[in-house]
Image (cartoon, helix red, strand yellow):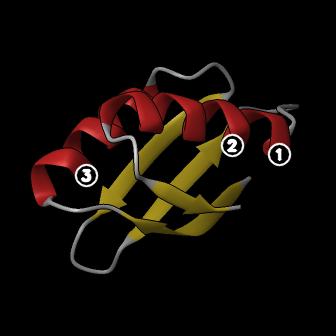
Amino acid sequence: MKKIYKIEVDCASCANKIEVAANKVEGVKSATVNFMTLKMNVEFEDGADEKAVMKKVLKASRKVESDCEIYI
């Protein structure tokens, strides 16, 4: 399953770091962050609980940028 989320991130460098962090989260097959559109595309692994995975993605993202927001 693929979903698109609106995000708030301060700079392109942080967006890249958030993308790397999101791709390390269990349950994420692939994640891309587009700083220009402020959107995150996430493809989930089969059988993954989308809401639980996204909470982990948000937690990982906030380790990179504490004021990052992902609208789940």
Q: CA distance from mark 3 to mark 1?
A: 21 Å
In the depicted view, which residue is nearer to us: 7 or 49? Answer: 7
Q: Residues within 10 Å of mark 1 (few under 14, many from 20)?
A: few
Q: Give the numbered dot on residue 51.
A: 1
In the depicted view, which residue is nearer to us: 68 or 25? Answer: 68
Q: Give the numbered dot on residue 15.
A: 3
- Look at the numbered discs 2 and 1 and tell me whether their residues touch, using CB distance below 8 Å: yes
Name the N-terminal-most of marks 3 and 2. 3
Q: CA distance from mark 2 to mark 1?
A: 5 Å
Query: Residue 54: image x %, image y %?
Result: 69, 43
Q: Amino acid at mark 2?
A: Met
Q: Residue at x 34, y 57 (%)?
A: 33
Q: Residue at x 45, y 37 (%)?
A: 62
Q: Give the numbered dot on residue 62.
A: none
Q: Residues within 10 Å of mark 2 (few under 14, many from 20)?
A: many
Left or right, 5 with reference to 1: left
